[in-house]
Image (cartoon, rainbow, N blue to C red):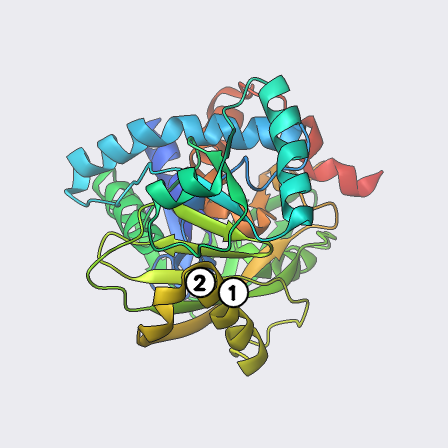
Amino acid sequence: MGTRPDLLVVGGGLIGCGAAYELAKAGLSVTVVERGAPGCEASSAGAGMLAPQAESSAASPWLSLALASKALYPDLVAELRDRTGVDVEYQTGGNLVCFQDEGDEAVGRAARAWQVESGLKAELLSPEDVRRLEPDLSPELRGALFFPEDHWVNNPRLVAALAQAAALEGVEFIQAEVSGLLRRGDRVVGVSTAESNLIAGGVLLAAGAWSGQLAATAGVTLPVVPVRGQILCLEGIPRRLHHLLHLKDHYLVPRAGGEILVGSCMEWVGFAKHVTAGQIGAFLQAAVRLVPRVGSLPIKATWAGFRPWAPDGKPVIGPWPGIEGLFVSTGHGRNGILLTPITARLIRELIVGGSPSLDLTPFLPDRFLK
């Protein structure tokens, strides 16, 4: 690396690449340090859902953040296509949260009530309405709650497009494993790798599930831990499904190429990155129960990834209190893809202007010091 950059971004996933892109567009010199290819961990392991309504049980600061982020997606998708030529397969078919029994239906009716009261779109559908939208769904379903404004993307394509756009904007990418943060007194001045020390004007820690370990090297306690998720990919050609589908704790995500992603789970197992027979079996059972035809589809792949999880389930975004030059952007849990645009914007506003456009109080790192 030549001259000292204004900012080092530790982590080349969607959160890191998105922030790097925004900061570079604002005129900062930025270097991203990632041990593998951009997006090699959680950013490519997820299913790509942009589904804040299905993820929420009540109005909250998290929901406001998520809705603000989803609203940025159309412009971001168009910008990335113009800059890189990459189609990230942004799809807007909406989300069917299906009812298998009376309990599901009661939960769905309650969810519709508070969401409509909050000004969000949510529709209760009869079994006949559901089958008209998705003819392959099980005839035993009791109906569904339809969120027309829940969307999805092809997340591996998205992270590739963001990384390319960042590089075109002048961001330098270094492939190296960061072993620690470099701290001098009350300031973080760079990072250490096996090859060298990298010095910068500041550091953005966006290393996902590994952020807590790296923060500890600077004497900082950041309680972010890995939560494993597993996914099953079915070969669904020709494509027949055109909506996100949920049934209890499971989901099906149809991709433009015909694949169907089935997931997911949340497992506090440390960094054990193996796929388990029990979870894959549960995914298959749920998928066949919801869409009987998928029982004849071939299994294309299975994989696992680690979500970064904070104790209160909320992302950690902002400067670390009492330490100059250290910013944190992690803990996005199962919604890092959804929250990428708004997180990138807020980080840029914090670092460049010092004043974020949304209230970050619920998400600031200092909540762990109280």
Q: Is residue 202 in view from this perspective?
A: no
The residue under the point 69% across, 39% down is 365
Q: Looking at the rendering, which quadrant does residue 24 occupy? A: top left
Q: Residues within 10 Å of mark 1 (few under 14, many from 20)?
A: many
Residue 222 drawn at (x, y percent):
70, 51
**260 or 364: nearer the viewer:** 260
Q: Which residue does the numbered mark 2 point to in the structure image?
A: 262
| Left or right: 26, with 9 as reference point | left
Residue under circle 1? Answer: 286
Q: Position of residue 142 (x, y in %)?
A: 54, 47
Q: The N terminus appears in which quarter of the rendering?
A: bottom left
- Earlier in the chain: of badge 1 and badge 2, it is 2
Residue at the farthest right position: 370
Amino acid marked by disc 1? Ala
Label 1 residue SS = helix
- Are the residues tagged 1 and 2 within 8 Å (C-beta)? yes
Q: Is residue 234 above or below residue 127?
A: below
Q: Nearer the viewer, mark 1 or mark 2?
A: 1
SS of the residue under disc 2: strand
Q: Residues within 10 Å of mark 2 (few under 14, many from 20)?
A: many
* 213 left or right, relative to 243: right
Residue 320 in the image: state x and y as whole percent. Answer: 67, 39
The percent coordinates of residue 63 (x first, y second) are 60, 31
Say if 315 sits above or below 282 in the image. above
